[in-house]
Image (cartoon, helix red, strand yellow):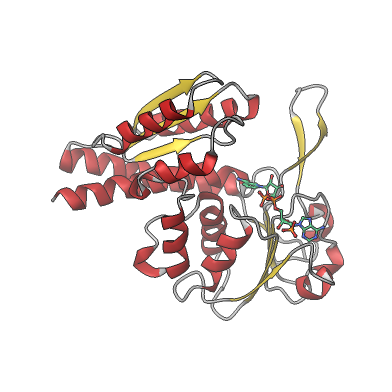
Amino acid sequence: MTAEIISGTEIRKTILAEIKADVEEMKAKHGKVPGLVTMLVGKDPASVSYVTLKVKTALSLGFHEIQDDHPEDIPESDLLALIHKYNNDPDIHGILVQLPLPGHIDEQKVINAINPDKDVDVFHPINVGRLMIGGDDARFLPCTPAGIQEMIARSGTRTSGAEVVVVGRSNIVGKPIAMMMAQKGAYANATVTIVHTGTTDLSVHCKRADILIVAAGVPGLVKPEWIKPGATVIDVGTNRVGMNKTTGKAILKGDVDFDAAKEIAGKITPVPGGVGPMTIAMLMKNTLKAAQYALEDIR
Ligand code: NAP
C-alpha cells in the first residue's frame, strides 16, 4: 500500500493562517503586532534567499518587520551593539541573526548576546537548557525540530509509547528533536534512540522505528528495507544532487529513497515539500509567542 504523504507545504499554509488570525486578534485587542528583526551580514546567496523568504512571510502575516542588512566587514562590536539596541526595543519581539556569519565574528558570542526571550531561532544556551527541562520552561521550540513535531502531530501519528529513531545528532536537528520526542507530554512521550556515525549497525535500529526521523545529510542513506512496514518516516535531509538545466534550480533529494520507501511506510514526508517549508512557519510561530509573552509581562 502506498504511504500517506505528509505535505509540509499544506501544513505550513494552515499554520500561517492560524498565526495571521492570532496577529489580527492581538492588533484588535492590544493595538500591537509581533515585531521581528532579521539581521543579515554579507551577501551569501543562500542566506540572502532565506532572509528574503523570512521577511516576505513576516510581512504577509502583518508583523512589524525590520530587515537589517550589513556589509561583510561589519565589526563584531557593531553587530553586538545593534543586538543590544533590539534587546531593549519593546516593538521587537524576535531577533534573528542569519547564520553563518563571516569568520571574524564569533557566532556564539552573537547568539549569547540575544535576549533569550527574543531568541526565536532558539540557539541561546538558556533556551537549549529550557528545552532540556521541558514543560512550560521551554518557551520556544527550535524551528526545524518544532516543524517535525507539528508534522507528526498533525498527521495523526501516535507518539506515546512509540519507538522513535533519530538518525543524526546535530545541535540544530538531531539532538533537540530526540529530546522533544522523549519529553513527557502531548505529541511526545516516546522511547527514543539516536544513531550517528559511531553506531555499529544503523539498520538494526531503523528497522524497529515506529517513527523514523532522518537528519544526516547523506542522500539515500536509509535503505527501503530498513523501514518498518507502516512506520512514519520524516526525512529532514536536503541534499543538492544537481541542477535543473531548464529552471536553473537545484535538484533536491532527501536522506531516504522516497519512491521505494513510500511503498513500505505508512506516512512519509517528501523532499522537497516536506520538512523544509515548515521551518519558517515555526520561526513565525515563535515570534508570535514572544510577542504574546511580552504582552503578558506588561499586563
Ligand atoms: P549535520 O550537522 O551535518 O549533522 C549530521 C548528523 O548526521 C551528524 O550527527 C552525523 O553523525 C550524522 N551522520 C552523517 N552521516 C551519517 C552516516 N553515514 N551514518 C550515520 N549518521 C550519519 O547536519 P544537520 O544540520 O543536522 O542537517 C542534516 C540534514 O538536514 C541536511 O541535509 C540539512 O540540509 C537538512 N536540514 C534541513 C532543514 C530544513 O529542512 N529546514 C533544516 C536543517 C537541516 P556524527 O555526529 O557522528 O558526525
**Vertical order, 251 against 183 (above or below):** above
- Foreground: 195 or 230? 195
Q: Is residue 13 visible?
A: no
**Vertical order, 7 against 35 (above or below):** below
The spot of residue 156 in percent (x, y) is 55, 66
Q: Is residue 152 left or right of residue 166?
A: left
- Foreground: 82 or 56? 82
Q: Quadrant of residue 55?
A: top left
In the image, what residue occupies the spot 43% across and 29% down?
Answer: 77
- Foreground: 299 or 163? 299
The spot of residue 17 in percent (x, y) is 41, 43
Which residue lies most toward the bottom here?
161
- Foreground: 223 or 43? 43
Q: Quadrant of residue 200?
A: bottom right
In the image, what residue occupies the spot 42% across and 56% down?
Answer: 127
The spot of residue 204 in percent (x, y) is 82, 75
